[in-house]
Amino acid sequence: MYAQMIKTASNGIKPREEMSEEERAFQDKIDNDIKIEPRDWMPEDYRRTLIRQIGQHAHSEVVGQLPEGNWITRAPTLERKAILLAKVQDEAGHGLYLYSAAETLGVSRDELIELLHEGKMKYSSIFNYPTLNWADIGAVGWLVDGAAIVNQVALQRTSYGPYARAMVRICKEESFHARQGYDAIRAMAFGTPEQKRQAQDALNRLWFPALMMFGPSDAESTHSEQSMAWKIKVKSNDELRQQFVDQTIPQIEYLKLDLPDPNIKWNEERGHYDFSEPDWPEFFNVIKGNGPCNVDRMKDRVAAWDDGEWVRDGLLAHARKKAARKVAAE
Amino acid sequence: MTRDEALFEFLLRMGDNTLILGHRVSEWCGHSPVLEEDIALANTALDMIGQTQLWLGLAGEVEGKGRTADNLAFLRDAWDFRNVLMVELPNGDFGQTLMRQFLYDAWSFVMTDWLKGSSDPRIAAIAEKAHKEVTYHLERSGDTVIGLGDGTEESHSRMQAALDYLYPYCGEMFEKDKSDELLAEAGIAPDPTELRPEYDDIVGRVLAEATLAIPGGSYVHKGGRNGRMHTEHLGHLLTSMQWLQRAYPGAAW
């Protein structure tokens, strides 16, 4: 769920009578749950909105390597190190499928990366928070991947075929990561007093940023309607957030950790947990670039790209020489 | 020195090489030149950490003092490590990392190929698994060395500089001491010097295709494999790698 605050590239829903014949046929397909495929006709705004969403999702997978990579070299056992390496490798792999899904919409990976580096595209706000102790790695798997799954399971039904199919595969891996994350934090919650303190600290710090991953409340989410009609978005931000809270509270209780919010309480009438809203001004600040790690994350990514230019150029030059030699030999 | 002592020494050498190089490679996470390389480097590191679990696990078993692979990885100090110096050197640029990987992979390929036929079935089993992984690593690092060596002027000169820097560390992988002799006699492990011709052949072929020149000097940096003297870099690496285990002794993770 690494896409939030996606601005739909249109102004509200177009009434059916104003649609062209192509637009009507397109909407009918969506209403009948027929997937849209790359070669199908689609409204330009649909295409642009999807590029933003899939691109942001891909960027999040890539930037998301950084907070987890921060602990690979300090993982406490060989097994935990191997699990974390495998997870980060999976995340980079998700980035790769998602860029490929975006490419089916007519934008290249390099163009998307350039937009990210110029600050014209974003990645999920969650990765602008630091990972400060080892329990954070457990919490990232449990809460961050857990929140991602809630969103991405819904997106398996999204209208664009390549994106929906990428979600099916990604969800399988994310579920595995979430279980591993929970296992890592469980070892700490039931460990020594110092370990338990780390687990509690990780939960307290990451709880609200995890809730923010679903984006602002529905009342403030101005671009949702058209995306819902196009089934780019399948459930509302608040619905997904509630679902995440409801599934996570019993897991916190099982760990015997203190709840990270004093207002968490089962509401019999609603059949859901009540909870406090995240600090939305903080969220908007993080989105604007003022989160604890925004500047460093982008600096790292831009440096990786710039420092790697000679490598990309070198490999490309070699591939050209090799092709030329092959032609000459024929 | 008993044969089991020699075997323990050998297993530490194998496991420490993969542990320390796996650690170095993992430092690239999220910082490599292109997404495919992030994936490939994480995968390589992961394979090497997996091999470490096997080599050091067996080392602990052979030692018979109840030490696990984790105990050996996280609770020894630098002087007890038996990796060759090359793997503990800092990553440098991407070219230096891949050149080191290639120079190591070629050795690891020849070594695990031999060990598949070891008279010790436990070693043969680990080598069987590792050799498959190493075959792929070597293909990939070799291709990258060729691509960058025979790429642009800049990539060529960076790769030549990496080779000039690293080549003097290669010889240590073929050093022989008393423990090697004991194991070679028993058919458990090869005489390291005998691996050199095949290694030189692989390295020579790839470097020629990469249009890179093997440096002329014959000096060999050594001291890691026998624990006499590591580089200054190893202590820093262990400081971060072992931190949690040292700061919270006895905790289960």
Image (cartoon, coloured by chain):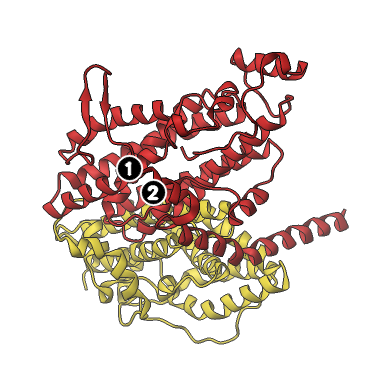
Chain colours: A red, B yellow
Determine the residue positioned at 66% across, 61% down.
A312
Pointer 2 local density, CA inside 10 Å: few below 14, some 14–19, many at least 20:
some
Q: Amino acid at mark 1?
A: Phe
Residue hosting label 2: A282
In front: B252, or A161?
A: A161
Do labels 2 and 1 touch, CB within 8 Å?
yes
- Rendered view: B181 above or below A167: below
* Residue A236 in picture, x, y percent from top left: 45, 26
The answer to which quarter of the image holds residue B85 is bottom left
The disc placed on residue A208 is 1
Secondary structure state at the residue bearing disc 1: helix
Total count of labels: 2
- Rendered view: A176 above or below A110: above
In front: A19, or B222?
A: A19
Q: Is residue A22 left or right of residue A150?
A: right
Quadrant of the image containing the N terminus of chain B: bottom left
* Residue A251 in picture, x, y percent from top left: 23, 33
Secondary structure state at the residue bearing disc 2: helix
In front: A232, or B39?
A: A232
Determine the residue positioned at 44% across, 29% down.
A218
* Residue A197 visible, this orientation: yes
* Residue B165 in picture, x, y percent from top left: 53, 80
**What chain does mark 2 sit on?**
A
